[in-house]
Image: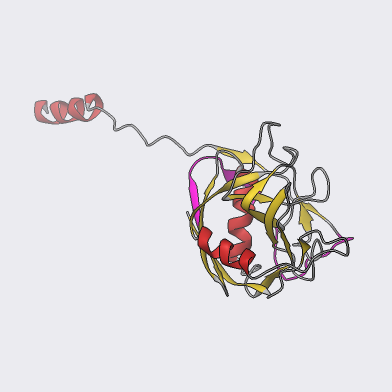
Amino acid sequence: MRLLLAVLMMVVLAPVASAAPATPTVRCEFIPTPENPAARPVRPPSSTVPAKGTVKVTIVTNYGVVVADLDRANAPCGVENFAHLARSWFYTMSQCWRLTDTTRLGVLQCGDIYRAEEGGPGYRFADEVTGKETYPRGTIAYGNQGPGTNGSEFFIVHSFANIKPVYTVMGHVTFGMDTLDRIVKAGIVPKPDGTLDGAPKKPVRILHVLAQG
């Protein structure tokens, strides 16, 4: 009896191992856009997403590979959406329709299935901005057609982007900026006034996007 009591006391008084802190999460609203249905079969991501950690994405193009780290803490809904679309093969065998190289804007715009700014995932979600965003070389961010219209379109800054801080920043390129440089060097179809803002002279194709994390 005494032995049993001693064992019970040891169990009761034994220190309890503290559980690992739970990963913080946020709620996202992915709103259907029936007026712009999904260009490829894909469901919206989960509405509860991690708000901490990094997603490593590898964008494989016909010009080479671009690797970026996406920051969940900075744009949890946007990062989860990008990873979800990548894992759903939404970006696989798609095309980057717009390339710019002006004194104000130097970006490669991708993520639309049909043509520039047409062919999204069939839903939209809110911006994740503070109003202090900057867009230096290597930034990867969402493109949009106004507040709260994020979907699948994104851009990568190959030089700089002197634009208003209204575009959600997902992260930054860690490897492969030389791939962007080769794309720019291949040329741009200019506008009638000569502005270098149009389709790449040689098509830029996304063969696949891998997402880890």
Residue 148, by quadrant, is top right
> Who's the residue at 74% across and 67% down the image?
97
> Who's the residue at 64% across and 73% down the image?
205
Image coords of residue 150 (percent x, y): 75, 50
Scheme by which the image is coloured: secondary structure
Total marks in image: 0
- Magenta-colored stretch includes residue 157: no
The answer to whether any part of residue 45 appears in the image is no
> Who's the residue at 81% across and 42% down the image?
147
Residue 209, by quadrant, is bottom right
| Above or below for 134 versus 157 | above
Residue that sits furthest to the left in the current view: 3
Residues in magenta? 34-56
Image coords of residue 151 (percent x, y): 74, 55
The answer to whether any part of residue 135 appears in the image is yes
| Above or below for 95 versus 55 | below
| Above or below for 96 versus 6 | below
Q: Say whether residue 171 is left or right of residue 132.
A: left
Q: Quadrant of the N terminus?
A: top left
Image coords of residue 76 (percent x, y): 60, 43
Image coords of residue 159 (percent x, y): 62, 51
> Who's the residue at 54% across and 65% down the image?
179
Q: Main secondary structure of the magenta part?
A: loop
Q: Nearer the viewer, residue 79 or 130?
A: 130
Q: Say whether residue 99 is left or right of residue 192.
A: left
Q: Nearer the viewer, residue 191 or 149?
A: 191
Q: Nearer the viewer, residue 195 or 49?
A: 195
